[in-house]
Image: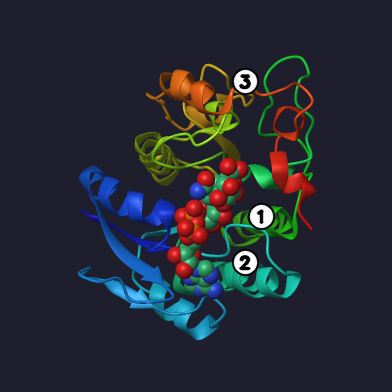
Amino acid sequence: MTTTILLTGAAGGVGTLLRELLPPYGYRLRLADLEPIDGAGDSLAFDLRDADAVRDAVRGVDAVVHLGGISLEDTFANILGSNIEGTYHLYEACRLEGVRRVVFASSNHAVGFTPLGGDGLIGSDIPPRPDTYYGLSKVFGEGLASLYADKYGVQTVSLRIGSCFPRPRSPRMLSTWLSPADCARLVHAALTAPDVGHTVVNGISANTRAWWDLTSARALGYDPQDDAEAYAEEITAQYGDLPADHVDARLLGGFFTQTG
Ligand code: NAI
Ligand code: 15L
């Protein structure tokens, strides 16, 4: 049986990558974003702030991959509408329509003020330390996911994504990169692992310079195949080495800790 997935934020950077990479796993996608996506069969245009439209969009799907929302720092009012209320609408819609699995795109910025440079890798069980209103909205999303798993049986894997782009763009991303193919592997694992309740996992590739531990992601079946080290020479030639006192080397969220 084909599994139908609602992909919110389908027109964005990660959504555009996953539109190509998820169907080979056997998923049928229903795409959603603010504007219709040209040439896509099952494509819906609505604002996550519209609760009725969100409910119509989840009706009949087996699971949701929730990427939609503001992906950088913004005003609190904008974050409140698109990320906090929007994610609430999504979970309410899942509860009301009987959708039992969500993959939530959380972020490293939910824990962005976590210091780097301690002993060992950083797990996915650390306390929230948001670095922005944006990161705070991801803390809210993780909390909402926990509530809806415990109270209503809507199970979620929250992916604390590092940096998901076609290739690393900075020295920091040699540590935080999640390759597109590994992103698809991680989403597939998060959609198919049994009995996840609410599970938080770190989302990066098998990076030589990783700060994050992947134990909880691997427990879902995630087996990353890429390593940002393949780009180290060209990134270092372009930007030099990261000085130890640079914010990107001191705090997990890097420059996001200095916005606002
Ligand atoms: P993006 O900004 O490229 O895409 C987000 C999409 O959400 C856009 O197409 C936008 O139109 C849509 N959107 C925004 N507000 C909306 C609303 N009110 N209603 C409906 N749609 C709305 O972001 P990207 O990079 O693709 O990220 C996808 C998700 O993953 C985001 O939730 C982001 O916070 C998260 N994430 C991404 C990371 C990355 O490295 N790309 C890292 C960590 C988290
Ligand atoms: C994020 O959460 C952002 O959505 C993305 O654009 C990147 O800035 C990423 O984090 C990162 O930290 O590299």
Question: Tags 3 and 1 in contact by the CB under 8 Å rule?
Answer: no
Residue visible at 37% across and 36% down in the picture: 185
Kindly report the distance in space between the C-alpha atoms of the residues bearing marks 3 and 2: 35 Å
Q: State which tag comes first along the sequence, 3 or 2.
A: 2
To which residue does mark 1 refer?
Answer: 138
Asked whether 153 or 74 is in front, the reply is 74
User: In the image, which is nearer the foreground, mark 3 or mark 2?
Assistant: 3
Q: Which image quadrant is residue 75 in?
A: bottom right
**Marks 1 and 2: CB-CB under 8 Å?**
yes
> Which residue type carries mark 3?
Asp
Give the residue at mark 2: 83
Count residues near mark 2 (Cα–Cα under 10 Å), then give few for <14, some for 14-19, many for 20+: many
Q: Is there CB contact under 8 Å for labels 3 and 2?
A: no
Where residue 166 sits: x, y (%)?
38, 40
Residue holding disc 3: 241
Q: Helix, strand, or loop for circle 1?
A: helix
Q: Is residue 71 above or below residue 189?
A: below
Asked whether mark 1 and ligand 1 are closer than 8 Å, the reply comes as yes
108 relative position to 15: left or right: right
Q: Could you tell me residue 35's position as x and y percent?
A: 38, 77
Q: What element carries label 3?
A: loop
Q: What residue type is labelled 1?
A: Lys
The response on whether ligand 1 sits within 8 Å of label 2 is yes
Q: Quadrant of the C terminus?
A: bottom right
